[in-house]
Amino acid sequence: MKRLWIGLTYAVFIILLIIPLSRIAIGAFDKGLDGFAEGLLRPEALHALMMTGLIVVFVTFLNALFGIMMALYLVRANWLSRKIKGILNSIVDLPYAVSPVIGGLMIVLLLGPDSIIGGFFEGIGFKVVYAFPGMVIATLFVTFPLMVREVMPVLQEIGNDQEQAAATLGAYGWTTFVKVTWPSIRWAVVYGLVLTVARSLGEFGAVLVVSGNIMNKTQTATTLVYQDVENFNVAAANGVALVLAAFSVGLLLLMEWAKKRKGVH
């Protein structure tokens, strides 16, 4: 029975992951190496990959900054009541419960040109929705829980005895964080960053709603793949998808390395 379950596990792994990835790799070279290069070097493909890279950079930075802060508040902030912490915990988990498409729609309704806030920003010449800022916000909404949920368990496990001792000896909050807290959570942060980058690379639903998918303006790699498939340009779609898959595999390997380092430290 044990061998049967192991065999079924491998079969599911092959069917759901190996075969689709192999098909993408083969499809990317349907027109040869020149066709693969042409699909990636198209102006719209280069722009979409650049937009995806910029979104990943901004979202990863913001997620690291605010994710660590939120984790610290939820675990260390004694001045917050349990009720407030419960509400904040629920808000952090909201992207898990809400479809990314619905999240994107919420952002459009809140910050779109027809809303009060969006209209104000439009009036001062700062466009949020159907522009780069909205795409960053949409991706940040989807990825925000990843950093918080990686750092919180580590903070709960290590406790705050060393931090209190440092404060007793006269260390300021920032000094305590750098010298005491950070060494304990740094690999959890690395793990959270890897997950954030991987999720940002693959985000589709929320970004599609918020961006409008305008070619050479607000198109990302995933929405370009969607458009290529719709236009029956399957070889080019496979080429872009293969690049994203290669990055994802690399990130998975980095994640496994980070997990081992977390175990060591």
Image (cartoon, helix red, strand yellow):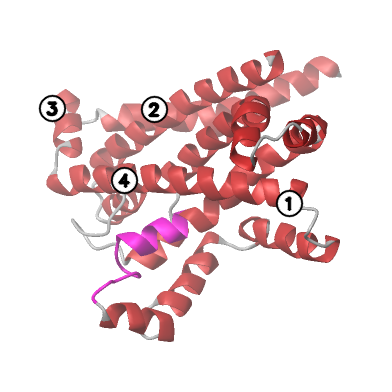
Residue type marked 1:
Leu
Horizontal relation, residue 234 to residue 135: left or right: left
Seen in the picture, residue 134 relative to 173 is either above or below; the reply is: below
Start-end of magenta stretch = 125-139
Which of marks 2 and 4 precedes in the sequence?
Answer: 4
| Point 40% across, 30% down: residue | 247
Residue under label 1: 74
Residue under label 2: 246
| Viewer-proximal residue among 190 and 130 | 190
Q: Does residue 146 appear in this view?
A: no
Instruction: Kindly report the distance in space between the C-alpha atoms of the residues bearing marks 4 and 1.
Output: 30 Å
Q: Which mark is residue 159?
A: none
Q: Secondary structure at mark 2?
A: helix
Residue type marked 2:
Ala
Residue type marked 4:
Leu
Residue under label 3: 34
Q: Are marks 4 and 3 in contact (CB under 8 Å)?
A: no
Residue under label 4: 54
The question of residue 132 being in magenta is answered with: yes
Which of marks 2 and 1 precedes in the sequence?
Answer: 1
| Viewer-proximal residue among 183 and 217 | 183
Instruction: Kindly report the distance in space between the C-alpha atoms of the residues bearing marks 4 and 2.
Output: 18 Å
Q: Quadrant of the N terminus?
A: top right
Residue type marked 3:
Asp
